Image (cartoon, rainbow, N blue to C red):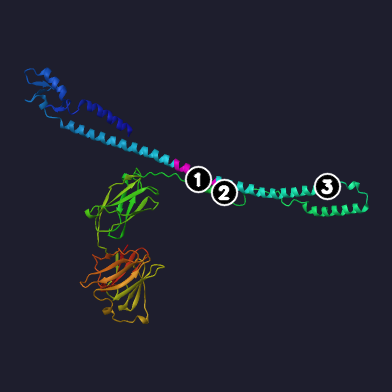
């Protein structure tokens, strides 16, 4: 690649010296050859005389000079086009060189940052090791000093008793009376009995430092062997792509999947790349708004970028990997205010997949099993989390009765449920026939969203229940079915 750049640069320099677009402007002759204006001026001055023509310096064909002189000859559009092309290529190659140089500088900066981090980390480890070493040394000195104090006190006591005995023995040789000698012997015997307790050291000399009581050294070695990891990446950002998943609904958390590839276009198999993303509102009244985003590394070469657009409108998301933009960046999309069901289950009837006046629904928190009260058929329908039929529960207590008239009234709420995050969902039918599910919150008074089911209208919605992954299942009494929506 470098050789190509050098060759093209050298060719450009030669070509640029021949044609500079000013004094050496390329002119097209009638014979289709191209000669610069400066050369034509000299040739015409030496050959024309009174004939008003000159010969082409390449093919020797006779060229008539137009009324305005050689400068009036038409420009060589082909050569000018080539000049423009080579100028653009030179500009692009210069930009490429600047980009590579910038990346080299960033690589050097990243290396210095890594080395600084290595030094800082091992300085912290060394400080911890020095601290522990000093603690053990202090402990050794403290225990040794305590033992030494006891032994030295005993040693001093023995020396004191020894001096007393020597004083008692002095002058004993001059005693001649038996009574005095007997008294001295009794005194010495008592002192001897008292000193028997000093015959053995009151403290021992055992002092050792044992590092083999546990596997601390092995654990330190194991932890040091996995401490730190130098990571790099072969990701080529300009070939990476992003795609949206599903319809983008206002107020609902949506997801963009980023897929990374290397320079050869092969998909990456692991993660760890620094990914930055920014959501931009294109609609005029929202351009100053900021939106929080959450990037999740799937550790398989893909990344999930979660965001929540508060209002309907036109948006764009800018994504960069290793501080370089990906392909087709920014990614533009439209956000709708209409929240339609993800799936609809059931129709009017008494069959396996049918309902007759369903009014209530509940979800088992353990396995997300769905229970629908099908009053018209006197049964409870049991469905899986994916709204697939499992079984029917029947009982004498579920006798048929027409409760259609008192299930829901106009302008009234039909059902209510609260999820684990204190979000309230209610089904409502208004006087003008508008039906929807309203989302409120016990923790956030500003939250007030609407699930309008625009493309699959609700008809007298009643019972509802939420799942663990922010979905709500709504009983649509008027359509004899249940519908599942995302609500957060």
> Badge 3 is on which residue?
167
Does the magenta stretch mainly form a helix, a strand or a loop?
helix
Q: Secondary structure at mark 3?
A: helix
Name the mark on residue 299: none
Q: Can residue 460 be spotted in the picture?
A: yes
Please tell me whether residue 121 belongs to the stretch shown in magenta: yes
Q: Secondary structure at mark 1?
A: helix
Mark 1: few/some/many CA within 10 Å (<14, 14-19, 20+): few
| Position of residue 243 measured from the top left corner of the image (x, y, whole percent) | 30, 53
Q: Can residue 351 be spotted in the picture?
A: no
Say above or below: 232 vs 21: below
Q: CA distance from mark 1 to mark 2?
A: 20 Å
Residue 426: name its quadrant: bottom left
State the residue at coordinates (15%, 30%): 76
Q: Quadrant of the C terminus?
A: bottom left
> Badge 1 is on which residue?
124
Disc nearer the start of the sequence (1/3): 1
Residue 139 falls left or right of residue 275: right
> Badge 2 is on which residue?
218
Give the magenta part as a residue range.
Answer: 115-129
Q: Secondary structure at mark 2?
A: helix
| Position of residue 245 measured from the top left corner of the image (x, y, whole percent) | 30, 56
Question: Dots 2 and 3: beta carbons under 8 Å?
Answer: no
| Position of residue 62 measured from the top left corner of the image (x, y, whole percent) | 10, 22
Q: CA distance from mark 2 to mark 3?
A: 62 Å
What is the count of numbered marks?
Answer: 3
Mark 2: few/some/many CA within 10 Å (<14, 14-19, 20+): few
Say above or below: 293 vs 325: below
Q: CA distance from mark 1 to mark 3?
A: 64 Å
Task: Report the mark closest to the observer, 1 or 2.
Answer: 1
């Amino acid at each position: 690649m470098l050789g190509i750049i050098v060759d093209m640069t050298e060719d450009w320099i030669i070509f640029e010296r021949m044609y500079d677009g000013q004094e050496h402007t390329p002119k097209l002759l009638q014979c289709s050859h191209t000669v610069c204006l400066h050369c034509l001026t000299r040739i015409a001055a030496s050959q024309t005389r009174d004939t008003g023509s000159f010969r082409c310096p390449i093919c020797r064909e006779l060229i008539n000079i137009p009324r305005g002189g050689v400068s009036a000859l038409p420009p060589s559009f082909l050569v000018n086009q080539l000049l423009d092309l080579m100028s653009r290529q030179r500009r692009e190659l210069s930009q490429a060189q600047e980009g590579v140089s910038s990346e080299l500088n960033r690589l050097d900066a990243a290396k210095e940052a890594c080395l600084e981090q290595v030094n800082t980390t091992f300085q912290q480890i060394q400080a911890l090791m020095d601290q522990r070493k000093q603690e053990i040394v202090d402990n050794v000195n403290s225990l040794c000093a305590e033992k030494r104090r006891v032994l030295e006190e005993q040693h001093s006591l023995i020396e004191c008793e020894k001096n007393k005995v020597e004083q008692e023995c002095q002058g004993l040789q001059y005693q001649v009376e038996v009574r005095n000698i007997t008294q001295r012997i009794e005194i010495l015997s008592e002192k001897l009995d008292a000193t028997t307790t000093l015959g053995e050291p009151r403290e021992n000399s055992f002092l050792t430092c044992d590092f083999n009581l546990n596997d601390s050294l092995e654990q330190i070695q194991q932890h040091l062997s996995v401490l730190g990891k130098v990571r790099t990446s072969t990701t080529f950002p300009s070939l990476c792509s992003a795609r949206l998943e599903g319809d983008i609904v206002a107020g609902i958390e949506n997801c963009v999947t980023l897929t990374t590839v290397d320079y050869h276009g092969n998909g990456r198999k692991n993660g760890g790349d620094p990914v930055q993303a920014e959501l931009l509102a294109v609609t005029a009244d929202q351009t100053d708004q900021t939106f929080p985003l959450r990037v999740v590394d799937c550790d398989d070469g893909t990344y999930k970028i979660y965001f929540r657009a508060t209002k309907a409108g036109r948006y764009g998301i800018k994504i960069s990997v290793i501080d370089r933009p990906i392909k087709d960046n920014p990614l533009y999309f439209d956000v709708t205010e209409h929240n339609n069901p993800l799936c609809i289950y059931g129709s009017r009837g008494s069959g396996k997949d049918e309902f007759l006046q369903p009014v209530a629904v509940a979800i088992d928190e353990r396995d997300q099993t769905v229970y629908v009260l099908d009053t018209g058929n006197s049964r409870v329908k049991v469905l899986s989390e994916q709204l697939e039929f499992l079984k029917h529960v029947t009982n004498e207590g579920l006798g048929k009765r027409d409760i259609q008239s008192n299930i829901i009234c106009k302008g009234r709420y039909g059902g209510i449920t609260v999820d684990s995050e204190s979000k309230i969902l209610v089904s409502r039918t208004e006087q003008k026939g508008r039906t929807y599910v309203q989302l409120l919150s016990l923790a956030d008074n500003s939250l007030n969203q609407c699930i309008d089911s625009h493309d699959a209208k609700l008809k007298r919605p009643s019972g509802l229940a939420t799942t663990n992954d922010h979905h709500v299942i709504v009983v649509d009494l008027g359509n004899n079915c249940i519908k599942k929506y995302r609500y957060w």
